[in-house]
Image (spheres, rainbow, N blue to C red):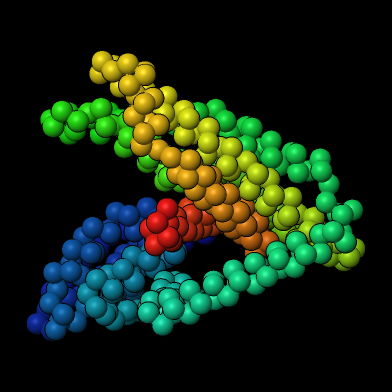
Amino acid sequence: MADPIGTQAPPASLRIARGPDGTSLTFAGRLDAVGAARLWGPTMDAARRLPPAESLVLNLAEVSLCDTAGAALLLAAEAAHGGAVIQAAAPQMRTLIERVRQARVPPVPAPPPPAWTYAQALAGGITAAADGLAFLGEALVAIARAPLRRRLLRFADFLRYADQAGVRALPLVVLMGYLIGLILAFQSAVPLRAFGADLYVANLVSISLLRELGPLLAAVILAGRTGSAYAAEIGTMKVNEEISALVTMGIDPMTMLVLPRLAAAMLVMPAMALLLELVGLLGMLTVMIGFGYTPEQIIGQVKHAATLKDLIGGLFKALCFGAVVGAIGCRSGLRTGLGPRAVGGAATNAVVGGIVATIMLDGLFAVFFFRVGL
């Protein structure tokens, strides 16, 4: 049944009376959603214009109905002025206003996260290094025990991982290698042509590809495609508790899951690097032929500049890069937390960690090869 008083009550109205000690806002009628919307502008203007030193009185003696919208209007006026006195409100109205006031209390803000410090960064780096060393130790132990656990090593899985990591990556390797050789040759020829030495672009590109760019770019491709795939596959198994089931059955996850993937990554990396280098040289050959040189001249320059030790050194680096990328991908998968987001985080960590570790290892190889004269 509708409230007869509320139904017959006049619409909301507002009278503003200014006195020497403050301002009185007298409300009348229905302070419901319609009435509060009509009186919101005048009420807030009067509350804001009143100096903070003067008092604000909200007189509700003539209010016949007040709902949560009206209570919100009164509390907004109180907050705009910085305080107000509510007069002549019925007990039910006061109770409603207090409930709305409690609901308007802002939640306690969460404490700010602790500030980043060098000590925390150092501790995180030490923890990550210790975790990596522990994984390396587990992998070495699994390799040592592999002859005794041959039943866990399935050749079909190894071939499948090698196909996913190497064979299916060949189109991307060919495309990237050709474009890198093309771009590197063209950009190198622009400054060298001013000195009449653009023929030596073949020397520059061949040495760069064989010693550095071939293994490094192949490792980037492997980290983006295969490292993330390793982390996602093993991470999904970790989330679904399949790895826990393997451990319960007495099956070593390192031997069954990590070693085949690691061996596949190490096997395909030298082949990927070699293909990328050959295709890159073809890209360089395309640019040099466009500049008017014959293939015989370019091949002669390549033979004169690049040696067999450059090729072997690059392939050895590719083998090490493959081991690092595969190990980081498997480690990220085994360290996956719980929930679907953890799998995405593990894949991201595998890609970033694989690329960063490859670049750092490439720097160490550069220093080592310089010291030994290679």
Query: Residue at 81% of width from left, 59% of height from top?
Result: 146
Toward the viewer: 163 or 190? 190
Toward the viewer: 33 or 157? 157
43 left or right of 166 in image? left
Query: Residue at 83% of width from left, 47% of height from top?
Result: 154
Instruction: Quadrant for residue 10, please give it.
Output: bottom left
Instruction: Quadrant for residue 46, please give it.
Output: bottom left
153 left or right of 190 in image? right
In the image, residue 143 above or below residue 158: below
335 left or right of 61 in image? right
Q: Is residue 173 visible?
A: no
Query: Residue at 42% of width from left, 53% of height from top?
Result: 374
Query: Residue at 19% of width from left, 82% of height from top?
Result: 55
Residue 104: x and y, percent?
A: 41, 71
274 left or right of 19 in image? right
In the image, residue 80 above or below residue 160: below
Q: Is residue 34 visible?
A: yes
Residue 253: x and y, percent?
A: 78, 60
Residue 65: x and y, percent?
A: 42, 64
